[in-house]
Amino acid sequence: MEATLRVRMSAKDAHYGGNLVDGARVLGLFGDVATELLIRHDGDEGLFVAYDSVTFKAPVYAGDFLEVRGRITRVGNTSRGMAFEAYKVIAADPTPEQPSRARVLEEPILVATATGTCVVPKPFQRGPGAGAGAAPTGDGGRG
């Protein structure tokens, strides 16, 4: 199972000089993809418990568009192994005369990868595909 989202990094995402975006922002996007995958697979948002590896490969700047991909690589009793990749698909390319200039990249640039583990407690699991059009089932045993 896979999920993808595309997001523009804005000026509020810039954390360092030169409009550089903090790597933590990319990790947050990996978390958003993980949440979608868990909802699609189990009908519950679950919990992200650990990253096994994180590698930042290229800088991300305000104005860049990222395509973030994730997939479930392993399904355990309650755990779900996941792998993530973030690609820059549009790069900000400002000039003093044209500060809003950008360019579509012919080849996306891999900016980050990660693997991690999420958990969906047994009482909250509604089975594969449960998040796809399934009717709500009350509080899911949480209350």
Image (cartoon, rainbow, N blue to C red):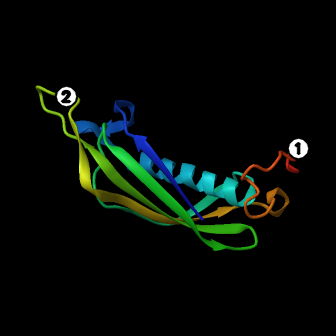
Q: Is residue 125 left or right of residue 21?
A: right
Q: Dividing the image into 4 quarters, which one contains the N terminus? A: bottom right
Of the 4 image quadrants, the one containing the C terminus is top right
Q: Earlier in the sequence, mark 2 or mark 1?
A: 2
**Residue 72 position by quadrant:** bottom right
Q: Is residue 121 left or right of residue 70?
A: right
State the residue at coordinates (69%, 53%). Answer: 39
The amino acid type found where label 2 is placed reads Pro
Residue lying at 15% horizontally and 27% vertically, measured from the top left: 98
- Residue at left offset 19%, top offset 39%: 93
Q: Residues within 10 Å of mark 2 (few under 14, many from 20)?
A: few
Three-letter code, disc 1: Gly
In the rendered image, residue 96, in percent from the top left (x then y), is placed at 12, 27
Report whether 141 appears left or right of 19: right
Q: Identify which residue, 107 or 120, lies in the foreground.
A: 107
Asked if residue 22 can be seen in this view, the reply is: no
CA neighbours of label 1 inside 10 A, class few (<14), some (14 to 19), many (20+): few
**Helix, strand or loop at mark 2:** loop
| Residue 85 pos. (x, y %) | 43, 61
Label number found at residue 138: 1
For marks 2 and 1, give the CA distance: 50 Å
Residue under label 2: 99
